[in-house]
Amino acid sequence: KMGHFISSQHAPVAPGQYTPETAVTDRNTGKISASKSSIVVPPVSDSLGISSIVRVRNFAPKAANEPPSLTTEDPFVVSTGKISPGLDDSVKGGPGQTLSFFFSVYVPPGTTTAPELSMEFYKGGQLLGRGAPPLSPPDSTGTIPYIATIPLDSFKPGPYEVRFTVTQNGKTATEKTKFTVE
């Protein structure tokens, strides 16, 4: 009732399928909650790729006088700040409401041009609309972190799917996620 907290732990893992299990105990009420999920870590590729899509709960911009990080193991730390991922798939819709997603695009080594990004929105399997926002050039590691912010003004309550597709030099990579507007 007093607020929330975010706990992060990073561990390098080899490619494969993992099943993280989490349990939390509320010491005041004695209630226990547990969850299990499945994560697939793909092998490193020299081809065009896109990470899993994460809903953004909060973004904390980097302070103007804060020095740049030299290296970080945290995939949610980008050059402009830190992303706190959202854990639920529901969002309040209506005028002035937005929904943000974060993902990274990975380009082949030596690539200096940004791939093209397209977004498609579906409801009940029917295409509602699409967009093609520009991507910045890749950083020195071949990564392009991206936050897509979507205005929810015209989204009616219900389940939706968004697909992000990147293309470059005849190669394509696609990821999709679902969300519900309340």
Image: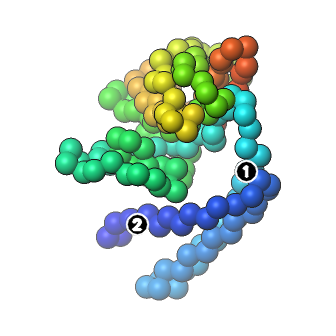
- Label located before the other in sequence (2 or 1): 2
Mark 2 or 1: the one toward you: 1
Question: Can you give x and y, in whole percent of width and height, for residue 36 in the image?
Answer: 70, 64
Relative to the observer, which residue lies in front, 136 or 61? 136
Q: What residue is disc 2 on?
A: 5
Disc 2 residue type?
Phe
Disc 1 residue type?
Val
Label 1 element class: strand
Q: Measured along the vertical axis of the image, is residue 53 above or below residue 112?
A: below
Label 2 element class: loop
From the viewer's perspective, tell me whether residue 150 is left or right of residue 17. Answer: left
Does residue 10 appear anywhere in the picture? yes
Count of numbered circles on the image: 2
In the rendered image, which quarter is residue 11 located in?
bottom right
Question: Can you give x and y, in whole percent of width and height, for residue 104 in the image?
Answer: 56, 37
In the rendered image, which quarter is residue 59 located in?
top left
Q: Which mark is residue 167?
A: none
Q: Measured along the vertical axis of the image, is residue 66 above or below residue 24?
A: above
Q: Measured along the vertical axis of the image, is residue 122 above or below residue 178?
A: above
Q: Residue at x 37, y 51 (%)?
A: 69
The residue lying furthest to the left in this view is: 65
In the rendered image, which quarter is residue 52 located in?
top right
Q: Residue at x 53, y 14 (%)?
A: 132
Q: Residue at x 37, y 33 (%)?
A: 97
Q: What residue is disc 1 on?
A: 41
The residue lying furthest to the front in this view is: 110
Question: Can you give x and y, in whole percent of width and height, for residue 94 in the image?
Answer: 39, 30
